[in-house]
Amino acid sequence: MTIVCATRFSEESTHAVKGAAALARKGREQLHLVHVIQPSVVQGLSDRLVETIRAALESEVGRLRATGTVATAEILVGRVDEELAKYCAGIGARMLVVGDTARRSGDLLAGTLDRLAYAVESPLLIIRDERPFERWAADGGELRVMLAFDRTASSAVARDWLGRLAQFGEID
């Protein structure tokens, strides 16, 4: 499975990147590390700051590659939900991984996860703690997962994805 992981260089994003990398290594898939910049922010940024963001992404990709993860970096400009949805569709991503921004206070951050869930056609995995994924990828133990399921096509896609995930190791 091709995995996209959105990062904003926060603690929550760090958990997501580590978990996504473990999944990519376990499934022998490529990880696309993506950062989205709002258009209004880009207008106010100097080229130097954009290059700083690019350097931070490339540094993270270098660290991931050192762990055996096949990874690339990409900077997108636009609304987070729209750009990630287009990017995931464009590369045929089987999953989008993000950190749990809803754990922070404020409706604005929780709203981003809501918009992503509706915008992205790929299953959306929100990682709060990367350690279970890293253990599962390293020692082949069982990975406990929870699936919120309803009668929509999105739920069927997520259910089917869990079936594919089970091909790489035990899940509960």
Image (spheres, rainbow, N blue to C red):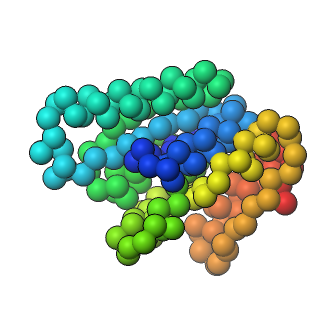
Question: Can residue 70 be seen from the camera position used here?
Answer: no
The residue sitting at 62% across, 28% down in the picture is 69
Q: Residue furthest bottom?
A: 151
Q: Position of residue 30 (x, y in %)?
A: 58, 32
Q: Is residue 9 left or right of residue 171?
A: left
Q: Is residue 72 left or right of residue 20?
A: left
Q: Quadrant of residue 127?
A: bottom right
Q: Quadrant of residue 31?
A: top right
Question: Can residue 18 be seen from the camera position used here?
Answer: yes
The residue sitting at 65% across, 25% down in the picture is 67
User: Number of marks in the image?
Assistant: 0
Tell me: residue 145, above or below residue 30: below
The residue sitting at 34% across, 70% down in the picture is 108
The residue sitting at 51% across, 23% down in the picture is 62
Tell me: residue 124, above or below residue 73: below
Which quadrant holds the C terminus? bottom right
Q: Position of residue 121 (x, y in %)?
A: 50, 58
Q: Nearer the viewer, residue 43 or 31?
A: 43
Q: Is residue 136 left or right of residue 104?
A: right
Tell me: residue 133, above or below residue 104: above
Q: Position of residue 126 (x, y in %)?
A: 57, 59
Which quadrant holds the N terminus? top right
Q: Nearer the viewer, residue 39 or 132?
A: 132
Q: Is residue 156 left or right of residue 77?
A: right
Q: Position of residue 23 (x, y in %)?
A: 68, 41
